[in-house]
């Protein structure tokens, strides 16, 4: 590599993304003005250079503290979300002006679209704002070509759903800005052509307008109607939008508060709302996104704590809101994968209601919400968290210094109530003391209907904010629903803690095994929960053939009470029950006995008592508990043929009944999993087993591929690797 410092003498040079090791290499140059060329060990060279560093990253995480201390002047420019409203509007107009000049067409921005982009909290800052506006202009350009209009229009219908979920509305007093948000504005193309290259890391890889023109010309050559052309080009543009969004998405820039809402819940809510927005032709804002993410998080906590999810209105939801229910049902597999829990029909019904009632602006006026707490900044900090999460400034706060008199507090609080009231009443969340008892006093003094809810926490504020911002409840309904939801939340936490205590008190842990630790293991857990009520108060851990079962057992210690599955983990003093015993009442009774008694003599029923045909009949009779998406009869025939071929090759025609049940169930769950689009990802050891057991792998692959033909599924190598790990070595 040439000497970079020598090149700086006659000009500038840019270094992109300097890693920590590279930052350390500059220490000697900055401190002493000397350096060594790469490969030199003795000769020192001198250089006088000025370092000018610029980054859009967080310097506290991207630059070493020892490097930052060597920079004498540091200038921080505010993000677009931190700039004044007028400056943000000016940037929007500038970027739209560039598109108007490029197309030589006037562009009209509706008031609502202008408001949306003004309060859009761009994850990648100004560069992303510019490209999002260009993408919206491209959508409008497509409509312009298909209709007889003389201008482009940017309205909310051309704004992607993901933008609405990142909007934080604020109240604006300036009358001129509110007029713009109401009437919109026109941007004319007049002006000098663009001469400055405004390229940045977020420049689009192609000219969208040329892209659209070429697509239209291509489709018209195929003699498609104008309506079909517009529809097809729109789909092409949507696909391009999605690829651009993925290219620009930077997780590190996300403002998602992982300490309150974990990332997987946030992503799951985002995916569902994006899908629903397109299918239901609706726009879901940040309030709905946060509310749904919080609900999903609480749903998982409820399931983990062992509480039953029951929806008394499920039948009515399916009948009256079938589209919303179907959308959630279609996304159930993705939600299950994201959250790590199965989505029951009852929960799907609850989530569907978020899609129905997910409008952020149901009423023109809303119930006021005030946080009142003792101390310096206590209420203000909680209000700031809630407002940031919900994308609003509706939540007000009032802090009470410890030395302030009660009379003065009541007097000042009356003014806060009057300002917060929009005509529908006010809810006050308080912490303690005399605040709890002053509801009637404040209501009488202000003549404002109000209710006080005590013991305020951040979780309570979020639930209250979600309720008043996303529903049309009146004051009494809102307070009742806030109490109910918060009580559910606290009850879930108590039961979650109690389940852990129960485990320590002897109810313990069940180890469930299968070849992958996924398919059969999950079905075994479902069977146990359905047939043995006591297991709802127990914890489950799953393990596969390649798992460190001994290590897992050592970690949970004496709380491990029993192992159930298709693989015997051979743990000392831990009884094992084969999966086949789940299919008989005697087997269920035996598991109950092992769970309830500390010591019991094992009297395991041997599978050798069954002939091969009886083993097939035994498993086939219970197959509907394991297969959910494929015809059971087809799976039955397919699995029996597969077992016969595996017996011939891997077992030399001598297979135990245990092995028949294990292989049969593994194959059934594998085919069902693949058909549902939930095939297992390749394990870390996949290449190793394919290399070490190459002949065995190819033989098994041919067996499963042939069996899969009748079921119309394609078995990936990852599933074959898991399957092979459960079978004896025949050829290396």
Image (cartoon, rainbow, N blue to C red):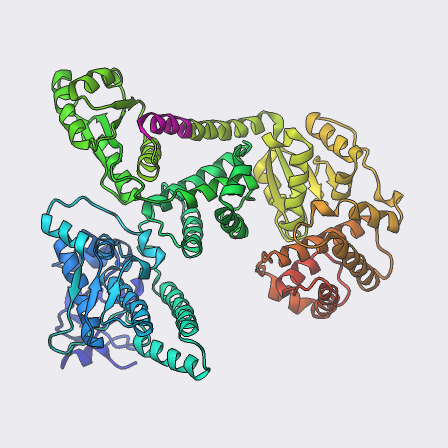
**Is 320 above or below relative to 195?**
above
For residue 232, say whether it is visible.
yes
Quarter of the rendering containing residue 691: bottom right
Using the rendered view, name the quadrant where residue 718 is placed.
Answer: bottom right
**Nearest the eye: 133 or 424:** 424
Residue at the farthest bottom position: 221
Which residue is rendered at x = 11% and y = 19% of the image?
A: 408
Which residues are the magenta region?
A: 474-486
Count of numbered badges drawn on the protein: 0
Give the x, y percent position of residue 532.
68, 31
Q: Is residue 77 visible?
A: no
Question: Residue 33: x, y in percent?
Answer: 15, 69
x, y (%) of residue 725? 69, 58
Is 482 magenta? The answer is yes
Q: Does residue 472 show up magenta in the picture?
A: no
Query: For residue 208, which quarter of the picture?
Result: bottom left
**In what quadrant of the picture does the N terminus appear?**
bottom left
Q: Quadrant of the C terminus?
A: bottom right
Tell me if 501 is positioned left or right of 361 in this view: right
Q: Of helix, strand and loop, which mostly describes the magenta segment?
A: helix
x and y percentages locating residue 432 in the rendered image: 27, 20
Indicate left or right for 728 with 331 as reference.
right
User: In front here: 363 or 443?
Assistant: 363
Q: Is residue 462 left or right of residue 528?
A: left
């Amino acid at each position: 590599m040439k000497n970079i410092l020598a090149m700086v003498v006659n000009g500038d040079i840019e270094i992109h993304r300097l890693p920590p090791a590279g930052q350390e290499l500059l220490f000697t140059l900055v401190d002493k003005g000397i350096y060594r060329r790469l490969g030199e060990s003795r000769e020192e060279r001198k250089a006088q250079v000025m370092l000018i560093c610029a980054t859009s990253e967080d310097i506290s995480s991207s630059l070493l503290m020892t490097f930052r201390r060597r920079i004498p002047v540091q200038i921080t420019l505010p993000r677009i979300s931190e700039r004044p409203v007028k400056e943000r509007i000016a940037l929007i107009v500038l970027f739209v002006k560039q598109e108007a000049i490029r197309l030589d067409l006037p562009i009209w921005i509706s008031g609502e679209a202008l408001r949306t982009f003004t309060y859009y909290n761009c994850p990648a800052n100004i560069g992303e704002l510019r490209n999002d506006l260009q993408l919206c202009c491209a959508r409008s350009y497509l409509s312009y070509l298909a209709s007889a209009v003389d201008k482009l229009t940017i309205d909310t219908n051309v704004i992607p759903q993901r933008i609405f979920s990142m909007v934080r509305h604020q109240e604006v007093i300036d009358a001129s800005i509110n007029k713009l948000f109401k009437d919109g504005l026109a941007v004319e193309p007049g002006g000098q052509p663009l001469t400055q290259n405004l390229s940045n890391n977020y420049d689009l890889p192609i000219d969208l307008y040329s892209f659209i023109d070429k697509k239209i010309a291509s489709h018209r050559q195929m003699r498609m109607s104008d309506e079909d052309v517009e529809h097809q080009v729109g789909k092409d543009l949507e696909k391009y939008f999605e690829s651009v969004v993925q290219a620009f998405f930077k997780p590190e820039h996300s403002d998602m508060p992982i300490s309150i809402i974990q990332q997987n819940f946030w992503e799951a809510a985002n995916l569902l709302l994006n899908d629903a927005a397109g299918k239901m032709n609706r726009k879901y804002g940040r309030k709905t996104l946060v509310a749904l993410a919080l609900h999903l998080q609480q749903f998982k906590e409820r399931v983990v704590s062992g509480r039953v999810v029951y929806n008394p209105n499920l039948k009515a939801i399916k009948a009256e809101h079938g589209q919303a229910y179907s959308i959630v049902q279609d996304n159930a597999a993705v939600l299950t994968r994201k959250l790590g829990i199965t989505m029951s029909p009852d929960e799907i019904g609850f989530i569907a209601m978020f899609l129905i009632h997910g409008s952020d602006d149901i009423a023109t006026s809303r119930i006021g919400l005030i946080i009142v707490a003792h101390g310096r900044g206590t209420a203000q900090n909680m209000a700031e968290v809630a407002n940031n999460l919900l994308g609003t400034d509706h939540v007000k706060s009032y802090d009470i210094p410890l030395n302030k008199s009660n009379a003065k507090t009541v007097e000042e609080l009356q003014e806060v109530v009057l300002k917060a009231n929009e005509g529908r009443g006010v809810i006050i969340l308080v912490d303690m003391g005399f605040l709890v008892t002053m509801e009637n006093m404040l209501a009488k003094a202000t003549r404002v209907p109000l209710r006080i809810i005590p013991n305020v926490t951040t979780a309570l504020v979020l639930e209250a904010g979600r309720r008043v911002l996303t529903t049309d409840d009146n004051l009494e309904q809102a307070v009742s629903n806030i109490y109910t939801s918060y009580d559910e939340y606290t009850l879930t936490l108590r039961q979650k803690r109690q389940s852990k205590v129960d485990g320590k008190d002897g109810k313990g842990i069940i180890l469930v095994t299968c070849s992958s630790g996924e398919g059969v293991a999950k079905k075994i857990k479902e069977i146990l929960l359905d047939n043995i009520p006591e297991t709802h108060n127990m914890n489950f851990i799953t393990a596969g053939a390649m798992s460190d079962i001994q290590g897992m057992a050592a970690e949970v210690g004496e709380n491990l009470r029993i192992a159930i599955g298709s693989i015997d983990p051979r743990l000392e003093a831990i009884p094992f029950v084969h999966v086949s015993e789940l299919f008989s009442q005697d087997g269920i009774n035996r598991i109950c006995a092992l769970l309830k008694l500390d010591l019991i003599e094992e009297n395991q029923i041997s599978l050798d008592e069954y002939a091969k045909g009886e083993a097939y009949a035994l498993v086939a009779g219970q197959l509907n508990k394991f297969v959910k998406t494929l015809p059971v009869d087809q799976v039955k025939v397919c699995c029996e043929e597969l077992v016969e071929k595996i017996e011939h090759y891997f077992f030399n025609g001598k297979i135990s009944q245990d092995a028949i049940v294990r292989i049969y169930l593994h194959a059934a769950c594998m085919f069902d999993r693949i058909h549902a689009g939930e095939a297992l990802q390749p394990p870390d050891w996949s290449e190793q087993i394919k290399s070490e057991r190459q002949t065995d792998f190819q033989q098994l692959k041919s067996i499963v591929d042939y069996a899969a033909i009748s079921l119309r599924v394609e078995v990936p190598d990852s599933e074959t690797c898991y399957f092979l790990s459960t079978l004896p070595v025949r050829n290396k």
